[in-house]
Image (tube, grey):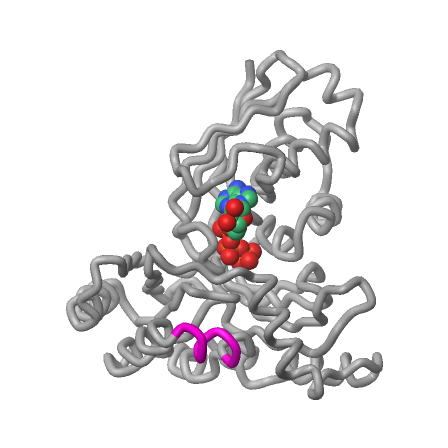
């Protein structure tokens, strides 16, 4: 029986700006997203039964209906009942390398891989925009994760416009294994504290979005000016997460003290990333910061920006 193995990269946010509330209960966002080559491996195989079965070695990953990879397979079964009948159920094996609940879109990239994989497994011939539309039904970050690379994401994060590739910047990811931040908590706290700054009229929203489109960070990305990219990182959620998680703030300070290109929290955290010009520097800074912080719960990964989302192996 045919099977597919797919690489599902994590993402970081180079820019995350909250513009306001949306009628659907989500936030209106403008983000610059970037794939990195730390990723999970997803294996898909038709199992000849009715069920969707999930396998993962990491006990933090749920193996039931709440798993985003499961939800993606279920959605495809609902959308394409004839193929589901012809091919039967699916075994999904997740080799988890992306830290869980880390602000790195781990679940979203797994869901994206299942959509891409089932499209191949069932020879559906869906285009990338069609896959993105299905992804948007599963989660705001799923559409970006399909094609990945460097992109502006607007709306609730599901409207994607590609930017010129960045791939020569090395990325240190650092996370305390005993620390996790709930994404809904971070956004709700932001709403409680900052909703007086929210913009609700469509003109205001498009002005704020346009400001990012034509802004310095996008220019720096187009010019591949890595120093400038590092100095222009921005994340609104730091305003609510850092005061409650001083260890995360201290970690950003530790990286900034090492002369990295820039350092910031990714998404709703608690992962911190630092950008470096080369691997030797990134390896050295990762181990120096681990020594300075001297906490056995701190894990660091050195990876690189990459110009793709889900790819078959
Ligand atoms: P985002 O950046 O999109 O908010 P995240 O990287 O912060 O996501 P995930 O790794 O997706 O967070 O995990 C968030 C929660 O989602 C976990 O606590 C876990 O219970 C649940 N979850 C569901 N499916 C998955 C999956 N395939 N991989 C990891 N976690 C999953």
The residue that appears at 72% across and 71% down in the rendered structure is 28
At 43% across and 59% down in the image, what residue appears? 180
Residue 169 position, x and y percent, is: 37, 67
Q: Is residue 153 left or right of residue 292?
A: right
Residue 106 shows in the view: no
Q: From this view, report whether residue 247 is shown above or below residue 159.
A: below
Name the residue nearer the viewer: 89 or 44: 89
**Residue 164 in the image: x percent, y percent?**
55, 67
The stretch of residues the image draws in magenta is 239-245
Vertical side of 50 occupied by 199: above or below: below
Q: Position of residue 12 (x, y in %)?
A: 48, 63
The image position of residue 210, as x and y in percent, is 71, 81
Confirm whether the magenta stretch covers residue 241.
Answer: yes
- On screen, residue 284 versus residue 269, left or right, reads left
> For the image shown, how many numbered marks are present on the structure?
0
Asked if residue 68 is among those painted magenta in the image, a careful observer would answer no
């Amino acid at each position: 029986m045919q099977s597919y193995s797919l690489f599902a990269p994590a993402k970081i946010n180079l820019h995350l700006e909250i513009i306001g509330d949306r009628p659907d209960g989500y936030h209106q966002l403008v983000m610059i997203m970037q794939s990195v080559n730390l990723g999970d491996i997803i294996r898909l195989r038709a199992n000849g039964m009715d069920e969707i079965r999930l396998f993962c070695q990491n006990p933090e990953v749920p193996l039931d209906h709440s798993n985003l990879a499961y939800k993606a397979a279920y959605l495809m079964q609902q959308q394409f009942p004839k193929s589901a009948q012809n091919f039967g159920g699916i075994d999904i094996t997740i080799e988890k390398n992306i830290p869980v609940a880390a602000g790195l879109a781990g679940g979203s990239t797994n869901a994206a891989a299942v959509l891409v994989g089932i499209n191949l497994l069932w020879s559906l011939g869906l285009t990338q925009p069609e896959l993105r539309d299905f992804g948007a039904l599963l989660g705001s970050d799923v559409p970006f994760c399909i094609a990945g690379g460097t992109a502006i994401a607007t709306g609730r994060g599901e409207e994607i416009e590609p930017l010129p590739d960045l791939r020569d910047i090395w990325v240190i990811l650092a996370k305390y294994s005993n620390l996790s931040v709930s994404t809904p908590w971070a956004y709700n706290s932001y709403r409680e504290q900052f909703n007086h700054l929210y913009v609700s009229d469509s003109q205001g929203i498009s002005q704020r979005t346009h400001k990012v489109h034509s802004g310095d960070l996008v220019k720096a990305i187009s010019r591949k000016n890595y120093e400038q990219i590092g100095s222009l990182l921005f994340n609104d959620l730091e305003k609510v997460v850092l005061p409650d998680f001083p260890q995360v703030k201290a970690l950003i300070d530790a990286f900034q003290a090492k002369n990295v290109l820039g350092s910031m929290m990714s998404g709703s955290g608690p992962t911190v990333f630092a950008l470096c010009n080369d691997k030797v520097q990134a390896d050295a800074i990762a181990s120096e910061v681990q020594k300075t912080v001297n906490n056995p719960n701190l894990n660091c990964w050195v990876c690189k920006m990459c110009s793709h989302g889900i790819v078959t192996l």
